[in-house]
Amino acid sequence: MCSDRLRDEELLAILLRTGYEGRNVLEISQKIIRRFSVEKLVELDLEFLTSIKGVGRAKAAGLIAGFELAKRGLNQGMGIAASITSPVDAVGLLADIKDRRKEHFVALFLNARNQVICREDVSVGSLNASLVHPREVFAPAVGSAAASVRCWITLLWGQSAF
């Protein structure tokens, strides 16, 4: 599942992890999102976050750390994803599968500017085979509104793309 399809309160609920007696985590995150815009939420300090019922020091520290990491990531690339125009451009995104002993079929879903909007690990096969039905590739592509799809299969003797 692609995290860009989750609503803001669902993403916040994942970061908060738990609620408190009488309130589940999604209810707490919905209340917080209604009270603060996402832009304001990332600027709140530890003291203010801990004043919100259901957000203790540990959760507040985790939120602040996550927000800071996201800010640093955006500052690194200015929020602009690299374009994928050839298999060489995708090597960094697929480094985790390059030395696997089984075939992996991975699809990268791109927007109209050939920027990655989602990665889907479609299939893990055997030593030299990987079964993939087209619907397993195209259903998530349609769901993420991809303009194009690039797929890679890792093989024991190298990497191929189509």
Image (cartoon, rainbow, N blue to C red):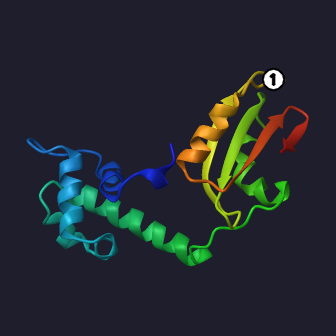
Identified at 70% across, 28% down, the residue is 133
- Say above or below: 67 vs 118: below
Considering every residue shown, the one lying at the far left of the view is 22
Q: Nearer the viewer, residue 72 or 150?
A: 150
43 horizontally vs 150: left or right: left
Residue at image mark 1: 129
Q: Nearer the viewer, residue 114 or 44?
A: 114
**Residue 28, percent from left and from top:** 18, 53
- Say above or below: 72 vs 53: below
**Residue 136, percent from left and from top:** 63, 33
Identified at 64% across, 68% down, the residue is 81
**Residue 147, percent from left and from top:** 66, 56
Which quadrant: the C terminus? top right
**Residue 73, percent from left and from top:** 54, 70
Identified at 89% across, 39% down, the residue is 158
Q: Circle 1 sits in a helix, a strand or a loop, which is it?
A: loop
Q: Nearer the viewer, residue 19 or 90?
A: 90
What kind of residue is marked 1?
A: Ala
Q: How many marks?
A: 1
Question: Local crowd at mark 1 within 10 Å, few (<14), some, or many (≥20)?
Answer: some
Identified at 74% across, 56% down, the residue is 92
27 horizontally vs 115: left or right: left
- Say above or below: 111 vs 123: below
151 horizontally vs 116: left or right: right
